[in-house]
Structure formats: structure tokens, C-alpha cells
Amino acid sequence: MASGLLALLDDVAAIAKIASASVDDVVGQAAKAGSKAAGIVIDDAAVTPRYVVGFAADRELPIIGKIAWGSIRNKLLFLLPGALALSSFASWSIMPLLVLGGLFLCAEGFGKVREMVRPANAKSSVAELSDADPKELEKRQVASAIRTDFILSAEIMAITLSVVGEASFVMKAAVLAVVGLGITLAVYGAVALIVKADDVGVAMTRKPPPLATFGRAIVKGMPYVLKVLSVVGTLAMLWVGGGIVIHGLAEFGFHAPEDGIHQLSKALGGGLVGWFAGAAISGLVGLALGGLTALVWKFGLGPVVGMWTSKRQSA
């Protein structure tokens, strides 16, 4: 009896070790995928605060909550099953889809750079939004944010799949779920802190020094922080989008751009300087690709999609 109990305990211990190793593998793979998607995560965190600009303070967190919930639905209900299906039945399509997502990021980044160069266009769109009914405006802003999140989330899931491509089906599903939930919580938790930082600063100004001084510094500094985040988000979008397309070209057999960046990084001694040089080149490539993609959409695909949509509506 005792020997049987000891054997059972040994089996339980062995199963526990296997489960622990599996959890470690999932966490390790998720961390690796998360680091690969860092640029997209930065962009997501930098872009989202703009969707609550102009709303009453008591609506900021509810709006962020709605966007976060939409992001979770995007990842777990649509993108995770879709990613698993693609990896099982059409794994060849993952890299082309990744490149298309990279081109979308480049186009978005190019659009943001154009808004910086021509701020009048951005101001006119803000003015149009300010004239809308607050409830309707909130719905539109949340819907717009969730649509943008869908593209960014799809890119994150595709990057995750490229990292765990040889893993088992269960491992892929677990890593995709961990990455999806972890990144969503991290991004929108950070966004909530950023958005409410000025309120915290105002509350601190009512306290005795040095808290009051620190609070005033927060209130004065947050507009500049948001501007910096916007620029960082744009740069991250161009760098990540350009880098994805360059890597995709290498996967398709055209190694020259990726090899050239690696050689330049080595020539500069690697490390942080080499990384910045590679990121800068990827960003410039992303900017050029974004401009080209915008032109193709404006004069090619855009009118075709518009005609098809109008025909479906009239039918």
C-alpha cells in the first residue's frame, strides 16, 4: 500500500514537472514573441490616448475599457482561431500576410508624418469630430480605435506565429492567448495611466510640498509627454513596418536589404548604435513604402473598392 502511494506521488511529481516545464515554455515563447512585437506595442500605446481627447474626464476610463474589451475580442475570438487555422492548413500564407500588415503599418506611419507636415488637415478632421453628438462621437471613436487595434493585433499574432511556428498546436494556442491577453493588459493599462496622469497631478497639487511641486510638474509636462509619445509611435510604426517587409523579402529570397542592414550594424560595432542605425534604415524604407502604398491605394485599389461598395449598397 505504501509503495503504491509512493509510486502515485512519484507520478504526480513527474506530471507536475512536465506541467511546470510547459508553463515555462509558454511564458518563454510569449516573452520572445512580445519582444519581437515591441514596436507595434509601443505604437498601440502611443496612438490610443488620442481617442479620448476632447471627452469629459469621467468618460476617459470607460472609453479605454471599451477599446480594451474590443481588443480582447479581436485577439481571442477572431485572430487566435484564424491564426491557428492558417498555421495548420495554410502556413505558407503567414509571411505574405505579415508583409501586407507591414505595408499597412508603413502607410499608417506615412499618413501620420503627412499630418505632421500638413497640420491643417489634422485640425480640420478634429473640428469635424468636435461638432458631433458626444454619444455618437464616443461610438465612432471606439469603433475607429477597435478597427486600428484589429490590424495591429493581427500583426502581433502573425509575429507570434512566426516565433512558435514549429511548436505543437496546443503550445501555439497557449502562447497566442498569453501574448494576446498580456499585451492587451499592458497596453491599455499603460494608456489608462497616461490619460489619468494629469488628474493625479492635479490632486497632488493640493498636497503640501514636495508633492504639490511634483504634481504641478506632471500637469505641465503631460502635454509634452503625449507629443513625444505620438512621435515615438509614428517612428515605431515605420520602423516595424519597414523591418517586417525587409525580413519578408529575405524570406522570399531577396536577402540584399536585410544583409546590408546587418553589415552596417556590424560596421558600427553592433550594440545600441548598430541597432539605432538598422532601425533608422528600416524606418526610412517604411516611409518610402508607406508613400508608395498610399499612392497605390489612392489611384488604384481605393477607387475599385469604392465602386464595389457603392454597387453592393445600391443592389
Image (spheres, rainbow, N blue to C red):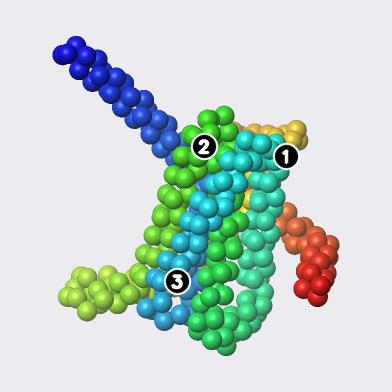
263 in relation to 192, above or below: above
274 in relation to 201, above or below: above
Q: Toward the viewer: 62 or 295?
A: 62
* Marks 1 and 2, the one that precedes in the sequence: 2
Q: CA distance from mark 3 to mark 2?
A: 31 Å
Residue 288 figure quarter:
bottom right
Residue drawn at x 40%, y 30% as measured from the top left:
22
Which amino acid type corresponds to the residue marked 2 in the rendered image? Lys
Secondary structure type for disc 1: helix
Which residue is tagged 3? 63
Task: Tell me the crowding category of disc 1: few under 14, some 14 to 19, or many 20 or more residues within 10 angstroms, Cα based.
Answer: some
Q: CA distance from mark 3 to mark 1?
A: 39 Å
Q: Nearer the viewer, mark 3 or mark 1?
A: 3
Secondary structure type for disc 2: helix
Which residue is tagged 2? 172
**Left or right relative to 106: residue 268:** left
Asked whether the residues under the numbered discs 1 and 2 touch, taking CB atoms below 8 Å apart as contact, a structural biologist would say no
Q: Toward the viewer: 304 or 225?
A: 304
Asked whether the residues under the numbered discs 3 and 1 touch, taking CB atoms below 8 Å apart as contact, a structural biologist would say no
Residue 2 point in image, percent of width and height: 16, 14
Residue 217 point in image, percent of width and height: 32, 72
Task: Tell me the crowding category of disc 3: few under 14, some 14 to 19, or many 20 or more residues within 10 angstroms, Cα based.
Answer: many
Residue drawn at x 44%, y 44% as measured from the top left:
178
Q: Toward the viewer: 172 or 211?
A: 172
* Marks 3 and 2, the one that precedes in the sequence: 3
Q: Nearer the viewer, mark 3 or mark 2?
A: 2
Residue drawn at x 75%, y 33% as measured from the top left:
253
Which residue is tagged 1? 249
The quadrant of the image that shows the C terminus is bottom right
Which amino acid type corresponds to the residue marked 3 in the rendered image? Ile
123 in relation to 116, above or below: below
Q: Nearer the viewer, mark 1 or mark 2?
A: 2
